[in-house]
Amino acid sequence: MSFDVNALLRDNIRSLVPYSSARDEFKGEARIFLDANENSLGSPLTKWYNRYPDPLQWKVKQALSQIKGIPPEHIFLGNGSDECIDILFRAFCNPGKDNVIINPPTYGMYEVSAHINDIEVRRAVLLDDFQLDLVHLENLVDENTKIIWICSPNNPTANSMNREDVEIVLNNFSGIVVVDEAYINFSRHKSFIQELKDYPNLIVLQTMSKAWGLAGLRLGMAFASAPIIDVYNKVKPPYNISQATQELTLQALGEVEQVNDMIRILVSQREQLVKDLTRLPLVLKIYHSDANFLLVKVADAKAVYEYLLDDGIVVRDRSKVELCEGCLRITVGTEQENKDLIAVLKRFLS
Ligand SMILES: *Cc1c(COP(=O)(O)O)cnc(C)c1O
């Protein structure tokens, strides 16, 4: 199957002359920097942030490259995954003409970002076992379909998509296939990141927001073939990742062991939570989870949600979402938080 990024691009992006910043035009060392209209005196902060940051975040990418085994040229960094998602719509999808396919129930940002960009969203609802409906998916594809969004492990259903199914999509669709792996670190399944060399149309999304514990920093990652990374860099705002985020991310990337410990604890807490929830009469079903949350079917989702809230515990009510009737989405907390949750649930209707 042939894949040509240029053919997929919007005309205005193909012909776009990207912004050239001071940091693009001069990259070397100098004695005096008078090229970027920064404040030469400094800033009110003890740690000076008066200089513009590296537009392409090479130090962060080099550190990530070591951890992920992916060359820096195949990495794009966004202001959260949300920016990695939005840029794809802006670069590849013609408003009012093109369409994308999502597999609901899934992460809400694909659809919101599509609507912001006036792009049609086609829905291949997951099968009852929360796996991809390949027949429906194939029927939805037409010559204006630019992107297929696959979330694995999926939010809010918590399961991973069958690898063979994702491979079938990758092998048979000539547009872009995004595999969002925000929760991959909590899963036993292999990432698709090592498949990049076989699939020029694949984009793998990951994030610092979940396993790495840095949701407040806003750093999302896209791993893809060099031509797709080039598109990202052409369309992104010049300084999309702040100096503070770059420095703190670099620092965090030096603590892989600590993060692996947290992942181990969260996964074991997840299994403990499954055991404890299973014993509660109000719990009808707990879906298998490859993530740091559980999708739990209860007798009366709204009532349980309100009951927990009255006790200061907030979970996500997903009972109005297709295939998630009666379900709450519960993030795995600390050991104590999980105990509190179970204690409150035990008191429900008793
Ligand atoms: C939480 C989440 C993200 C992370 O988004 P950020 O903007 O990086 O915080 C991405 N995808 C899915 C499916 C998520 O649930």
Image (cartoon, rainbow, N blue to C red):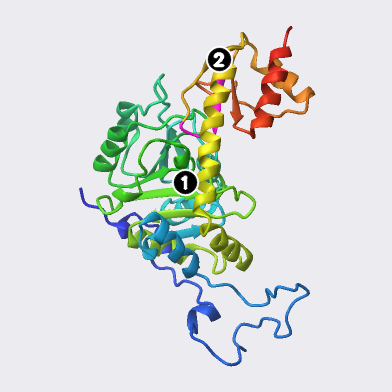
Is residue 275 in view from this perspective? yes
Q: Residue 231 in magenta?
A: no
Q: Earlier in the sequence, mark 2 or mark 1?
A: 1
Disc marking residue 96: 1
**Residue found at the very far left of the displayed protein:** 1
Residue at 40% across / 20% down in the picture? 129
Q: Secondary structure at mark 1?
A: loop
Query: Which region is colored magenta?
Result: 290-296
Amino acid type at circle 1 is Gly
Q: Residues within 10 Å of mark 1 (few under 14, many from 20)?
A: few
**Which image quarter: residue 6?**
bottom left
The vertical placement of 343 against 316, above or below, is above
The residue at which mark 2 appears reads as 278
Q: Residue 292 in magenta?
A: yes
Q: Seen in the image, is 248 located left or right of residue 67?
A: right
Q: Secondary structure at mark 2?
A: helix
The vertical placement of 284 against 83, above or below, is above
Q: Percent from the top left, x then y, of residue 8?
A: 34, 54
Q: Percent from the top left, x then y, of residue 278?
A: 55, 14
